[in-house]
Amino acid sequence: MLSTFLKRIMAAEVNHVPIPRRGVDYRGKIVLAPMVRSGELPSRLLALHYGADLVWGPETIDRAMIGTTRRLNQETRTVEWTRSASQGHKEPPPDAKESIIYRVFPEREASKLIFQIGTADPDRAVQAARLVAADVAGIDVNAGCPKPFSTSGGMGAALLRTPDKLVAILEALVKNITPEFEIGISVKIRILETPAETEVLVRRLVATGITALTVHCRTTPMRPRERAIRGQLRMVADICHEAGVACLMNGDVENRDQGLKLAEEYGTDGAMIAVAAEKNSSCFQSEAEGGLLRWEPVVEQYVKYAIEINNRFSNTKYLLAQMVPGKAKFYTAVQQSKCYSDICKTLGLEHLLELAQDCDVKRGLDKPREKLSKKARKNASALAAGGQMAETRTQGQHRKPLSDRNIVSNAKLEPAAVATAV
């Protein structure tokens, strides 16, 4: 099936927007979708291990990247962008903890990694993109996330209602980032309520100089549980091809073979997998390569990557909650685990136990946690639920949008926030 699909792409008599020297062509690709929490480094490495052609990192807000420091972590061989938590102050206090905003593994993913930016301003988009552009294969603008953490700042799906701003952002990135770093710019959108509205938007976007466009086949109000709408897909693909722009589809794609079949059916150049990849990244294998594997070997490989790159334990634990079936006998024990050593003992990964113990020491997970009193637990629960103290704290003060508060959507600090697919 793959060879037939590639032959169709190669034989199509369409103009192709030139792919920059360091960029990648999205044509013929089955890729990992950008997902908050589920797009962190170990998840991307896992997807590549099982055959993903490209991987998207989680949406990272421009303000979160601006002001970071780039460094090479010799121990994990990763490149990290870090900053100290300001804790509401203009300048971080002396004892402020350092947080990792974004990181890449150059040896394994740099030529296949697309950095997705959350932005509502052309100048900030360029400023943030410059910090990471030398270490990735492309920059993608998020114009499809429907969640308030993105739309409240005018980012994500909010850009679909401000097309002038979206066009200005893409044009600024194409003008400033592509020539300097020789990588392409792309955008990820959702369909609008009517084909006519979608057509007008897509025609404007493909005229900005982008190399690719991904369309999520749901409208902004739709939730993942609602079936994807593919009625507008061929129209979007045709408009992209008229301009020489690659078109990927997203929405209810379960595996590589299905993605290629849908791309063939609707005339797109490839497909993006989200929820299915979060649960089991072996979905990137074709049936000829072995197809979908049982969860156990996939989880083992994921835990190995997470330990190897010293991943935040809360993020690892969240992903395991998606990957280990709820009916599995290990599920509850995994959810109750407090460290990597617990995970390895529970899952019978004794060969990883020594590495897990080392990782626990580095992350401070080897130390017993102080047990809160009943009163302290009650106060903590009240605050978490938005009790009176939290209410009093917010009275009389205006809460800025997320994009103005130097907070990154993929929540790098431990513990992290709830995950969202975009």
Image (tube, rainbow, N blue to C red):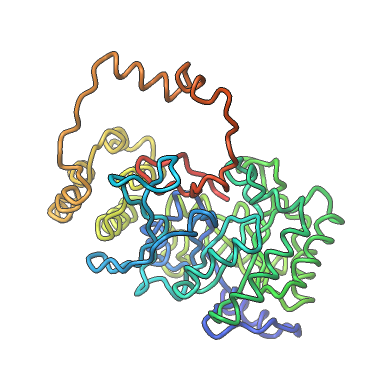
Q: Which quarter of the figure has residue 126? A: bottom right
Q: Judge left or right: residue 170 versus residue 62.
A: right
Query: In this rendering, is residue 52 above or below 388?
Result: below
Q: Which quarter of the figure has residue 143? A: bottom right
Q: Position of residue 410 (x, y in %)?
A: 47, 49
Residue drawn at (68%, 57%) of the image: 189
Q: Residue at the right extreme? A: 196
Q: Residue at the top extreme? A: 375
Q: So how many labels did they put on this image?
A: 0
Pick whichever, 143 or 281, lies toward us: 143
Q: Which quarter of the figure has residue 314? A: top left
Pick whichever, 207 or 63, lies toward us: 63
Pick whichever, 12 or 104, lies toward us: 104
Residue drawn at (60%, 78%) of the image: 178
Which quadrant is home to the N terminus?
A: bottom right
Q: Position of residue 346 (x, y in %)?
A: 21, 41
Pick whichever, 97 or 190, lies toward us: 97
Q: Position of residue 361 (x, y in %)?
A: 16, 49
Q: Position of residue 204 (x, y in %)?
A: 80, 66
Q: Judge left or right: residue 199 versus residue 110.
A: right
Residue drawn at (27%, 33%) of the image: 336
Query: In this rendering, is residue 381 above or below 33?
Result: above
Residue drawn at (32%, 55%) of the image: 302
